[in-house]
Image (spheres, helix red, strand yellow):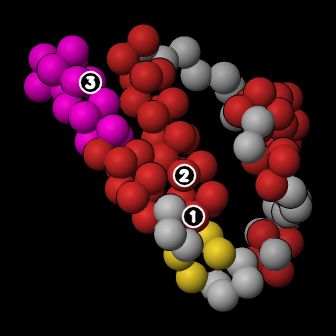
């Protein structure tokens, strides 16, 4: 948090119920954080948006796998691995769609 403050950025504290909601996170980022940082809203292609959504689901799987009582990964490691494989697949499909 101190590093963010030193850069003049506002830190946000998010609870599990908040980051579980894609809608909440979209609204927070699009209406609050983008405005604070002076960022415009991107208009990705359908393929790029699919990759970004898959990456977000993988991040959520990783966050859900954190065991805060033992500060390690819980038994949800298979879920994380599956999500990461979906990211790889979506990135490959994006490259195919973009002709790379």
Where residue 18 appears, as percent x and y from the top left, is 84, 45
**Depth-wise, is mark 1 or mark 3 nearer the camera?**
1
Q: Earlier in the sequence, mark 1 or mark 3?
A: 1
Q: How many marks?
A: 3
> Residue 83 in magenta?
no
Kindly check if marks 3 and 2 are in contact, taking CB atoms under 8 A apart as contact.
Answer: no
- Name, please, the residue furthest toward the left: 100
When the figure is inspected, residue 64 is found, relative to residue 27, above or below; the finding is below
Q: CA distance from mark 3 to mark 2?
A: 21 Å
Residue 20 image offset from top left, x and y in percent = 74, 43
Element at badge 1? helix
Point out the image quarter for the N terminus.
bottom right
Q: Residues within 10 Å of mark 2 (few under 14, many from 20)?
A: many
Q: Nearer the viewer, mark 3 or mark 2?
A: 2
Q: Would you say the residues marked 1 and 2 are in contact, meaning their CB atoms lie under 8 Å apart?
A: yes
Q: Main secondary structure of the magenta part?
A: helix
Gap between marks 1 and 3, in whole Å?
27 Å
Q: Image quadrant for the C terminus?
A: top left
Is residue 11 something one can see in this rendering? Answer: yes
Q: Residue at 54% of width from left, 41% of height from top?
A: 56
Question: Badge 3 is on which residue?
Answer: 94
Where residue 87 sits, quadrant-wise, is: top left
Residue marked by disc 2? 61
Badge 1: residue crowd in 10 Å (few <14, some 14–19, many ≥20): some
Please tell me how crowded label 3 is: few (under 14), some (14-19), or many (20+) other residues with Cα within 10 Å: some
The segment highlighted magenta reads: 86-100
Q: Is residue 81 left or right of residue 66?
A: left
Mark before the other along the chain sequence, 3 or 2 = 2
Answer above or below: position of 62 versus 3: above
Pointer 1 residue = 65
């Amino acid at each position: 948090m101190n590093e963010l403050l030193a850069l003049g950025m506002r830190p946000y504290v998010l609870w599990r119920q908040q980051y579980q909601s894609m809608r909440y996170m979209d609204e927070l980022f699009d209406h609050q954080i983008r405005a604070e940082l002076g960022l415009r809203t991107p208009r990705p292609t359908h393929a790029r948006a699919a990759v970004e959504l898959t990456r977000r689901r993988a991040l959520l799987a990783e966050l859900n796998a954190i065991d805060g009582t033992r500060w390690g990964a819980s038994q949800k490691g298979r879920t994380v691995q599956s999500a990461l494989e979906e990211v790889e697949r979506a990135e490959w499909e994006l490259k195919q769609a973009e002709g790379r």
